[in-house]
Amino acid sequence: MDVDQSFKLCKQQLESRDHIYVQCLFTQQVWERIMKWLTWQWNSTTTWDDHLTWCIVRAKGKSLNAQIFKMVYAELVYGIWIERNIRIFENKGRQSEEIAKEIAFTYNVRAPLRIKAKLQQLLFLCFYVDR
């Protein structure tokens, strides 16, 4: 049985943790859009260790930004994995822009009330004004 080992979102490299969440151009496009939505600086990392360090710095503490980052990161990891599975098992796919919007809207629904106003303002500015 011949099984395609390439990663289904970009079809450029073998599927691995590093490629799925750090090196894949599709994932990077989702990250770029999410970071633009949050109005945060995006610096693409190329290794898992650099990515992990980048995440730890942003997730450290109990600040509003740290709380937002932790939830958005979880949504992004889940969203990328779900998209991978949809492409494998249903032979369908979406653009990175659609995934970023879904992540943003899902986070907005799940966010604690104390940060919803900021998120709704960011959603409007990023996905409706910035076109």
Image (spheres, helix red, strand yellow):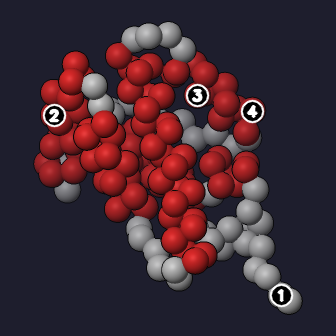
How many neighbours does mark 3 have within 10 angstroms: few (below 14), some (14-19), or many (20 or more)?
some
Q: Are marks 3 and 2 in contact (CB under 8 Å)?
A: no
Q: Nearer the viewer, mark 1 or mark 4?
A: 1
**Sooner in the amino-acid sequence: mark 1 or mark 4:** 1
Q: Which residue is mark 2?
A: 121
Residue 118 in sight from this viewpoint: no
Q: x, y percentage for residue 131?
A: 20, 56
**Sooner in the amino-acid sequence: mark 3 or mark 2:** 3
Q: Which residue is mark 3?
A: 55
103 or 47, which lies in front?
103
Mark 3–mark 1 distance (CA, rounded to whole Å):
37 Å
> Which label number is shown at residue 49?
4
Please tell me which residue is depicted at 47% across the width and 79% down the height of the picture: 92
Q: Farthest residue in the bottom direction?
A: 1
Q: Which residue is mark 1?
A: 2
**Sooner in the amino-acid sequence: mark 1 or mark 2:** 1
- What's under tag 3, amino acid-wise? Cys
How many neighbours does mark 1 have within 10 angstroms: few (below 14), some (14-19), or many (20 or more)?
few
82 or 8, which lies in front?
82
* Horizontal side of residue 83 vs 88, given as left or right: left
- What's under tag 4, amino acid-wise? Asp
Please tell me which residue is depicted at 74% across the width and 62% down the height of the picture: 15
Mark 1–mark 2 distance (CA, rounded to whole Å):
49 Å
Please tell me which residue is depicted at 50% across the width and 39% down the height of the picture: 74
Q: x, y percentage for residue 3?
A: 79, 82
Q: Are marks 1 and 2 in contact (CB under 8 Å)?
A: no
Mark 2–mark 4 distance (CA, rounded to whole Å):
33 Å
Q: Are marks 3 and 1 in contact (CB under 8 Å)?
A: no
- What's under tag 2, amino acid-wise? Gln
Vertically, is 88 above or below 50?
below
Residue 78 in sight from this viewpoint: yes
